[in-house]
Image (cartoon, rainbow, N blue to C red):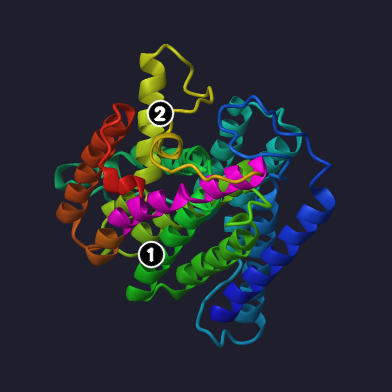
Amino acid sequence: MIWLSLVAFAVAVLCSGVTIRWLGGRTAPYDADKPQRFHVGEVPRLGGAAVLAGVLVSWLLGVWESTWRGDPGSLALGPWVGGWMAALLPAALGGMAEDMTQRLGVRYRLLLTLASGVLALWLLGLDVPRLGWGWLDARLPSLPWLGAAIVLLAIAGLPHAFNIIDGYNGLAGMVALIVSLALAHVCLQVGDRSLAALLVCLAGATVGFLVWNYPRGALFAGDSGAYIWGVVIALASLSLVQRNPEVSPWFPMLLLVYPVAETLFSIYRKLVRGDSPGMADALHFHQLIYRRIVRGVFHEDEAHQMLQRNNRTAPYLWAFTLLTVVPAVLFWRNTAVLMAFCALFALAYVVAYLGIVRFKVPPWMRH
C-alpha cells in the first residue's frame, strides 16, 4: 500500500513539473479582475491533471499487483476499481476543460459532476443504507430513491464544495490530504484495506502536487483538482459507510463539514442578496481571513509580498479543519457525538464569520 502512495507521489511531482514547464503559457489566462484572484502573474491551473495522473497510475498498478502477483499486500483491488475510474473521469475532464479554456459554465460543470454520480450508481451500486436516525433508517429500504438522491447529491456537490474553498496556496489540497488520511485510518480500523489503498494513493498524489503549490505557488489545482478530490472522497465516504455497518454515516459528514458549511452558507448569503449562487465573490470565510486577520508582509517586490501573505492564510483553515477531523476520528462509531460536533461546528462557523465581518477578532489571532 505504501509503495503505491509513493508511486502516486512521484508521478504527481513529475507531471506537475512538466505542467509548469510546458503547459503554463498554453492555457487561457486567469482574468485579473476576478474577485478570487490573490496572486501576481500567470500561474498554470492544471494541478488537477497531475493529481489525476498520480491517482490513475497508482490505482492501475494496485490492480495489476492484486490480479497478477497473487495480491501480496492483501489489497483486493480488482476490476471494480475501473468503475471508480469511469465515475471520476467526467468531473475531472470537465474541470480540465474549464482550467484550459475558462469557458465551461457552472451549469455544464455541475452536469458533468452529476454524470459522475450517475456512473457511480450504475457501475458501483452505491447506496446509503442508513442515516443515523432510527425512524428514518427503518423506512430507507422502502425508499430506494432517497439513497440514490443522497449519492447523487454527495458526488455532484462535494467537488464544487472543494472548489469553493480552493482559494489560497495549500488550502484545498491540505484539507483533501487530511480528510483522505482520516478516512484511510478508519478503513484500516475496520479492515477495509482496498478502500484504504485507494485513499492513500490520492493522498500521495496530493502531496506530490503540494510540493509545487505550497509554499511556492508555482501551480494551482484548478477546477480539475477540486473535482478529483471531491469525487474520490465522496466515493470513499459512501463506500466506507455502505460496506462497514460499524461506521457511523455522520463520520464522513463531520470530516467534511467545513467545505459543506462553506458551500451552504455561501449559497444562503448570495440568495439573500439576490445574487446567483454560481456567481463568484470575495466574501468566503478564507477570503475574510486573508483580508482581516492575516498580517501584511512588507517587501519591495509585490509578487513576493502577495505570495507570503497568501501562504499565511491556509494554516488558519488547516487548524479549523482539524477541529472537526480529530473528534471525527476519535468517535467514528458514535452517531450522537458526531452529530453534536457537526452542530457545534455550524454554530462556531457562523459566530466566527460574523465576528470577522464585524471586526471583532481577538488580537492574538492577528499574530
**In terms of depth relative to the viewer, which is nearer, 323 or 160?**
323
Left or right side of 209 for 163: left
Is label 2 in a helix, a strand or a loop? helix
What is the count of numbered marks? 2
Q: Which mark is residue 246?
A: none
Left or right side of 179 for 222: right
Q: Residues within 10 Å of mark 1 (few under 14, many from 20)?
A: many
Residue 323 is one of the magenta-drawn residues:
yes
Task: Tell me the magenta residue range.
Answer: 301-325
Residue indicated by mark 1:
182
Instruction: Return the x and y of residue 184 as percentages of the image width and height.
Output: 42, 68
Residue indicated by mark 2:
266
Residue 350, above or below 132? above
Is label 1 in a helix, a strand or a loop? helix
Instruction: Return the x and y of residue 331 as percentages of the image width and height.
Output: 22, 63
- The secondary structure making up most of the magenta span is helix
Instruction: Return the x and y of residue 294 as percentages of the image width and height.
Output: 43, 43
- Mark 1 to mark 2: distance in Å? 26 Å
What kind of residue is marked 1?
A: Ala
User: Going 35% across and 49% down the picture, which residue do you hit?
Assistant: 128
What kind of residue is marked 2?
A: Ser
